[in-house]
């Protein structure tokens, strides 16, 4: 299931990588160099005249409407949209992130943009796997395996191992997200950022709760369990919501990556429904046997045989 999701995510990124192209020939002029731009399926071509330090440049792009426009600006002080001249332009996240530092002589861009793109992909994959898959799987493990007496304490070690792996992997993804924010001045995904901080804090509280886990005989055990369940389920729900929010932020709302994650999550939800139904069937059967035993219609041996069947 997880491998299927990763395959869809990889295929989506490969598709995007090959969807853009640039051209140096127009109907009226031929240019020396060209490059693709990070947004709007855009590209540009140019010729730099070294003898007089002038630049001939043409822009290609896909506009929302035939009357669309493009603003060309140069920022001499820093590699960001904020502060360039002219400063009249849309201020959506895509517009603010549509920047590139170019060497007009060689045609190469600074490594900043490629590094940012790589970090975004790593951030998305790591957080989708950790907060969006591993933590829900760990919660399902605790809810449905703890009642199987044949497993003994194995369910607890499986639950703790999955959750700790998910949290530590999620911490790496969270740190990458912080770094992305530092590398993207002027770009703020307010909801995604707030949900990310909330999920990380809840995950940290859950991890710290292991250090203060009281014994089963302790009178405060029931309060700890209530806290553990509430914080755990809140972390899982917010984590899944933020994964979908992340797809929106990365512009992957209709991608194969999101399809793969939806299939993965649907499989997990379907498993939960099946296990929940099975749990209720067992509960009702045991309740019926307990009632018959109280009424003296079956003896203890019958109950024992019914439980182990």
Image (cartoon, rainbow, N blue to C red):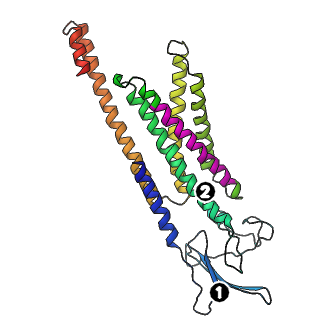
Does the magenta segment cover residue 160? yes
For the point 42% across and 34% down, the residue is 140
Does the magenta segment cover residue 188? no
Q: Where is residue 149 in the image (x, y as percent from the top left)?
A: 35, 22
Q: Residues within 10 Å of mark 1 (few under 14, many from 20)?
A: some
Numbered disc 2: secondary structure:
helix
In this view of the protein, which residue sits in the foreground, 136 or 89? 136
On the question of residue 58 being in view, the answer is no
218 above or below 138? above
Q: What stretch is highlighted in magenta?
A: 158-181
Dominant secondary-structure state across the stretch colored magenta: helix
Disc ID at residue 116 = none
For the point 52% across and 44% down, the residue is 130
Residue matched to label 1: 32
On the question of residue 187 being in view, the answer is yes
Q: Position of residue 210 (x, y in %)?
A: 56, 26
Answer with left or right where residue 212 lies relative to residue 143.
right
Residue matched to label 2: 119
């Amino acid at each position: 299931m997880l491998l299927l999701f990763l395959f869809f995510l990889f295929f989506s990124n490969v598709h995007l990588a090959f969807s853009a192209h640039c051209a140096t020939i127009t109907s009226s002029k031929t240019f020396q160099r060209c490059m693709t731009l990070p947004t709007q399926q855009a590209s540009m071509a140019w010729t730099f005249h070294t003898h007089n330090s002038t630049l001939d440049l043409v822009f290609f792009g896909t506009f929302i409407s035939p009357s669309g426009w493009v603003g060309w600006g140069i920022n001499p002080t820093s590699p960001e949209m904020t502060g360039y001249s002219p400063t009249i332009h849309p201020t959506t996240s895509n517009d603010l992130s549509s920047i590139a530092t170019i060497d007009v002589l060689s045609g190469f861009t600074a490594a900043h943009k490629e590094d940012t793109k790589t970090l975004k992909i790593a951030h998305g994959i790591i957080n989708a796997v950790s907060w969006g898959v591993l933590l829900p799987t760990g919660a399902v493990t605790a809810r449905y395996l703890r009642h199987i007496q044949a497993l003994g304490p194995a369910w607890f070690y499986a639950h703790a191992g999955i959750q700790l792996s998910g949290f530590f992997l999620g911490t790496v993804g969270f740190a990458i997200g912080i770094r992305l924010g530092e590398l993207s001045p002027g770009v703020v995904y307010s909801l995604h950022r707030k949900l990310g901080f909330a999920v990380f804090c809840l995950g940290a509280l859950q991890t710290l709760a292991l250090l203060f886990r009281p014994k089963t005989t302790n009178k405060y055990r029931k309060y700890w369990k209530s806290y553990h369940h509430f914080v755990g389920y809140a972390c899982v729900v917010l984590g899944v919501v933020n994964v979908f929010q992340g797809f929106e932020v990365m512009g992957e709302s209709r991608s194969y990556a999101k399809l793969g994650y939806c299939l993965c999550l649907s499989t997990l939800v379907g498993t939960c429904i099946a296990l929940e139904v099975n749990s209720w069937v067992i509960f009702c059967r045991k309740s019926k046997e307990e009632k018959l035993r109280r009424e003296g219609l079956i003896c203890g041996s019958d109950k024992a045989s019914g439980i182990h069947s």
